[in-house]
Image (cartoon, grey):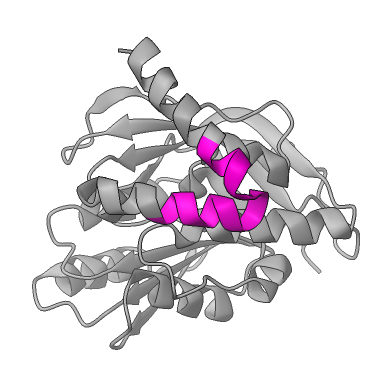
Amino acid sequence: MNDKPLITIITVTYNAEPTIEQTLESVERQTYPRIEHLIVDGCSTDHTMSHVQRYVERNAEPNRHTIRVVREPDNGLYDAMNKGINLAAGDYLVFLNAGDRLHEPTTIEQIVSQTGWQRDRANYAVLYGETDLVDAEGHFLRHRRLEAPERLSSKSFLQGMLVCHQSFYARTDLARSEPFDLRYRYSADYDWCIRLMRRAERRRLRFLNTHLILTDYLSEGLTTRNHRRSLLERLRLMAHHYGWSRAILAHLWFVVRAIIKR
């Protein structure tokens, strides 16, 4: 029985040839030994799978991290992410999409060292940290404007998605209990984090702030390209979870906050 948790990194891809290599390389460089990298590809028609195949071959030798590749049609990003959740063998899982990178080679090792993890114990429900934004070449742009709260709870997200879901490591058993809701096209990750935290709170499980920058996040994702629609969807989700009056007040504050930070 291993005394260290297995961490599943889920990478969802579709025609990700321009950005997938830096993601694969960032996982490959990790010093932590117990990593499962699960790649869920929606039948890419470009050279994404050529990059993936070379990555698999480079890591075929013993004592390298485990790589599993699933290639089949899906019904969009969040459907593919649900497949990843169901297939994950790890004790914790995190999503690292094409273009995103783990912040440094010791990132996973540093996270695990803080957990005090023990099998058959009520371990932390969520491990979380900060995020940097990078461009398509992986160059640093800025720190994410929304900072992770010192103490995270399901109420924290009334202030917006304070923790980027690529820096949100969830216990796999909890993630399986709260799959992504496919009714939402842009903000299902926001909804998923809230529901997962509420489930954890009902079970009186704790959240761990690692106080680390965990992820270099590619700023041109699906939500970024559809910013207005994403905001409207998030408003509806916020109203669903916290009530319309609080949701509207929160969004008025978002406008003021954006003006102040210019």
Residue 159 image offset from top left, x and y in percent? 57, 34
The C terminus: image quadrant: top left
From this view, report whether residue 116 is shown above or below residue 144.
below
Residue ranking furthest to the left: 46
- Per the image, is 223 magenta? no
Start-end of magenta stretch: 233-248
Residue closer to the observer: 66 or 86: 86
From this view, report whether residue 211 is shown above or below residue 165.
above
The N terminus: image quadrant: bottom right
Residue 108 horizontal side relative to residue 146, left or right: right
Q: Residue at x 90, y 53 (%)?
A: 204
Residue ranking furthest to the bottom: 72
Residue 72 image offset from top left, x and y in percent? 30, 88
Residue 171 horizontal side relative to residue 231, left or right: right
Residue 81 horizontal side relative to residue 110, left or right: left
Count of all numbered marks drawn on residues in the image: 0
Q: Residue at x 38, y 63 (%)?
A: 11
Residue 211 image offset from top left, x and y in percent? 63, 26
Residue ranking furthest to the front: 245
